[in-house]
Image: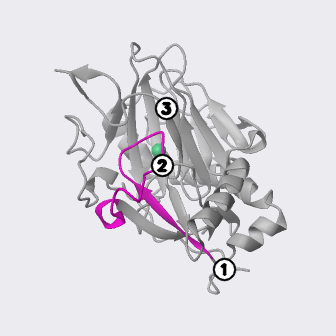
Amino acid sequence: MDFTIHKVSPAIGVEIRGLDVSRAIDPSIARDLRHAWQHDGNGLMLFRGQNLDKDQQRAFCSLFGTIGVRAGALPTKRPRAFEGPDYNSDSMLVSNIRQDGKPIGVLPDGELWFHHDMCYSATPNRASFLYSIEVPKTGGDTMFCNMYAAYDNLPKRLKDAIEGRRVLQAFDEVQDRRLDLSAVPVDDVKHAWQPMVIRHPETGRRALYVSRLMSHVIEGMSQAESEKILDELYDYTEAAEVKYTHKWAPGDLLMWDNLCSIHARTDFPKTERRLMRRFTISGEAVTPAWDSKSAA
Ligand SMILES: [Fe+2]
């Protein structure tokens, strides 16, 4: 099976051409894909023109790890987002399509700020596989940013300020603003203290592990000091030179590594249908960059 690898942007992402991922994939091909994903793509890989049912998408995803649980399965004392009729599946629909007035999927409408999927869990899912079935004519793009480059681009002053620090990652079903943790007890929402810089288990590189939507406060700092540093970091995490914006077409499959990338969605018209199917693979506790057990 011959395939070719093409950069989708200078910052992040490769496209694989010449591969029908609905078919059985030889283990040696899967190893080559994994290498391209991790090393050439910096954790983002694209396949266009695919035709996948749920079982075929699950089978492809399984080549890269164990299928992960849905975030909706995590305990929370807060009202859950409506999970749709597909709730008991190991896949998840992301959609604004409504039946009887209710969306058939999660995260139905509008903008979604930059985040790492499930960084608010002690063991975040490692990767996400999003397949497009119906897309709006305009908007609803997914933007990806390279968190290796974001870290490398930080001035020494900011690297020093966050070295050895943890940040509170939290999420409560709002998409385009940060939680007001003075109004909601943190123990009521899905949350985890995570290292601000992680050591990637496959590349050995450092990656910044903060995002505008889910990072709330830096441990050991005043709120004001924490806000100032997080705001400065977001300029680097969302900079044009580390970003790729994907304009979806039906049949696109994008897979991303949540340890070294963040992603966000642009707004789109409520009147247009958007239907995506997502699988994930599970992950382990993230490794701090400064963990003595990891490489220097
Ligand atoms: Fe996400």
Q: Of marks 3 and 1, which one's residue comes earlier in the chain?
A: 3
The location of residue 102, given as percent across then percent down, is 22, 27
The crowd level at tag 3 (other Cα within 10 Å; few <14, some 14-19, many 20+) is some
Mark 3 and mark 1: Cα distance apart in space? 34 Å
Quadrant containing the C terminus in the rendered view: bottom right
What residue sits right under mark 3 in the picture?
A: 111
Q: Of marks 2 and 1, which one's residue comes earlier in the chain?
A: 2
Is any atom of residue 229 visible in this view? Answer: yes
Main SS of the magenta part reads loop
Instruction: Determine the secondary structure under disc 1.
Output: loop
- What residue lies at 33% left-to-right and 59% top-to-bottom? 189
What residue sits right under mark 2 in the picture?
A: 178
Instruction: Determine the secondary structure under disc 3.
Output: loop
Query: What is the magenta range?
Result: 165-189
Indicate whether 173 appears above or below 134. below
Is any atom of residue 199 visible in this view? Answer: no
| Badge 2 vs badge 3, beta-carbon distance below 8 Å | no
